[in-house]
Image (tube, coloured by chain):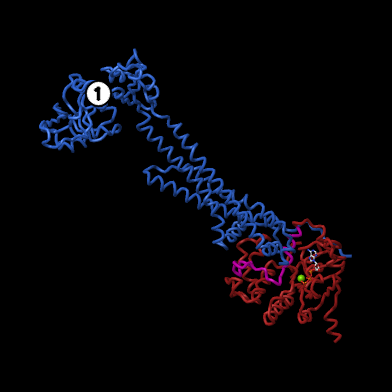
Chain colours: A red, B blue
Amino acid sequence: MTGTVAERAAADPVIEFRGIGLTYPGPPPVAALRPCDLTVERGEFVAVVGPSGSGKSTFLNIAGLLDTPTSGMYLLDGVDTGTLRDADRTALRGLRIGFVFQTFHLLPQRSTLENVKLALVYSGFPRRERTARAREALEQVGLGHRIEALPTRLSGGERQRVAIARALVTQPSLLLCDEPTGNLDTANADSVLALLEELHADGMTVLVITHDPLVAARARRTVTIRDGVLSVSDTEMSEVAR
Amino acid sequence: MRRVRRTGCIKPSVFAWRDVLSESLAGMLQRPGRSALTALGTVLGVGTFVAVLGLTATTSSQIDTRFNALSATEVTVEDIAHEQDEFAGLAFPADADARIERLNGVEHAGVYWPVRLAPGELVRSSAIAGSDGAQNSIDVVAASPGVFAAAGTRLAEGRVYDAYASELAAPVAVIGAGVADRLGITTLETHPAIFIGSQPFTVTGVVADTDRKADLLLSVVVPRTTAERIWGRPEAGGGKMLITTSLGAAPQIAEEAATALRPDHPEYFKAVPPPDPKTLRGQVGDDLNQLFLLLAAICLVIGAVGIANTTLVAVLERTGEIGLRRALGARGRHITVQFLAESGALGALGGLVGTSLGVLTVVIVAMFRNWTPVIHPVTAAAAPAIGLATGVIAGLYPAWRAARIQPAEALRR
Ligand SMILES: Nc1ncnc2c1ncn2[C@@H]1O[C@H](COP(=O)(O)OP(=O)(O)OP(=O)(O)O)[C@@H](O)[C@H]1O
Ligand SMILES: [Mg+2]
């Protein structure tokens, strides 16, 4: 169960939604996500698009175990998350899922290295190994030379790369990015996207919410959400068709 | 349909104590100015607490040593015969010293009174009036030989007069060092004489210092018998007796003295025992300290409110951080523990600084009074713990609030 990424790869899809839906109780009740089915296989790069308020973040929060669906069954790495106790859902979230947010959520007074190490605190990594692993993750995102810098001294793109390093350092099964380039200019957005593609090429499963059609075009598959209704289109197929 | 896996072995999230400690320290040090201000109330509360208890301990021990050394072993017997009988005269018998010294626990005893001189009678160093200027501010004291021992006199030169000289009512005098200076007496080898009025007295000794009755240093002391012979009895109520006792005997002696002096008229005397050090200390504790301890408690409450307020603000400010930590695998209780640890660290810091300031206050006050500073170890050990407890209690509500924040909600910020 807690095996390496390679072991997990041999088995189930990373995400499997069976009739997953979420209605905020209100009043008035808001059907933020209508019941839907979706399977994301290991190593996929999926873009999630849709207008503002359509339910993209809701979908991502369910996938990231930050929110509980009001209907359906969600299997993460083959584990039925609906039957889990809250503590187990939390542990699974910390170990299997890496989050990247539009607003970075870096602690401003802590160095780059410490921000990345924070991801290792709750999963019980031995203190001795944390620095080495965080350094490794920062090198992976191309920031090996800025480990002592404070986030406030970094460019937006660099900050987002630190956040990605923090998401990667626990070696999760799944990288969930909610508009990772929303706060970045084109050049920085490009570097972040290039990094995400690189990670995808190395076998990471990546889900990216985006408003940017260019980003969506780079993904193999696109999930479109409109008024809480989820539909899947295969970019590769459409590209081939073109 | 795919098989659904069992979920028995997910490694639970943890928040190791060392991580709790370093996270809370980091949280505190990130905003040093705010932390310092927040801890101020606790600093004042704990500081007052330590200072009050320390000063109490210091003064009580001071009272103790003083009482042991002098006051606790001293009884004064006053002649109140004139209140009973106008014509009673001097109530102390001639053998008063011997009668009292016979009592168990008495070390020394002696009778004394100020001699009332006629307006023209002055203390001089020569018979011829005016040759060296009249010394009109020198007092003459009549005293039985026991007074010197009871007062703990130490002589610069010569001897005090003995019982024999006293019995003979000899014209001898013991003078204080101050008097010797003023009369120009530098040595006793020439057997200098002084005159009180027209009466010559041989100076037998010069008093350098005393433990009690420091007025002897500025007086001419003559035997009570001689004084009675020349100037008659003291004025009503002027006669007194100084008794020194062994430790603890004073209250007993105070009760027995009157009867021992005059079995026929014990009511002629009023014996004054030393004040009870316990009641004295109790008074100190009752009056001031309770007020100050109340102040300390108020400071602590204010400190707690300050910490609670700051922590609550921090929780609201750091909602995003809370969401992030939850996303990274922190459970609600880990968030609680972190904020409790931060407020506890603030309280403990305030407690430590307050303890130091309190101790410093006690030491400085004691230094200026020439006292030995005394602080009970329990006080010093409990004070930082009180600060810690204040911080933790203050953090309870904010930490509870922090744990209830929904992660998805928090991350939307
Ligand atoms: N806690 C909540 N209670 C009630 N309604 C909610 C809650 N959170 C979100 N909603 C509603 O659910 C719908 C979907 O919200 P969601 O945040 O998923 O949109 P989104 O697609 O991420 O939008 P954006 O692109 O602006 O981020 C919105 O109409 C929103 O108002
Ligand atoms: Mg959103």
Q: Position of residue A11 (x, y in %)?
A: 81, 67
Q: Secondary structure at mark 1?
A: loop
Q: Is residue A113 above or below residue B166?
A: below
Query: Start and end of the magenta stretch?
Result: A88-116
Residue at left offset 31%, top offset 19%? B100
Quadrant where ligand 2 appears: bottom right
User: On the rendered structure, is B206 left or right of B282?
Assistant: left
In magenta stretch: residue A115: yes
Residue B249's image quarter? top left
> Label 1, on which residue?
B144
In magenta stretch: residue B147: no
Asked whether mark 1 and ligand 1 are closer than 8 Å, the reply comes as no
The quadrant of the rendering that contains the N terminus of chain A is bottom right
B368 or A201: nearer the viewer: B368
B281 or B126: nearer the viewer: B126
Q: Chain of mark 1?
A: B
Kind of residue indicated by mark 1: Ser
Looking at the image, the residue that sits furthest to the bottom is A242
Looking at the image, the residue that sits furthest to the front is B119
User: On the rendered structure, is A184 left or right of B279?
Assistant: right
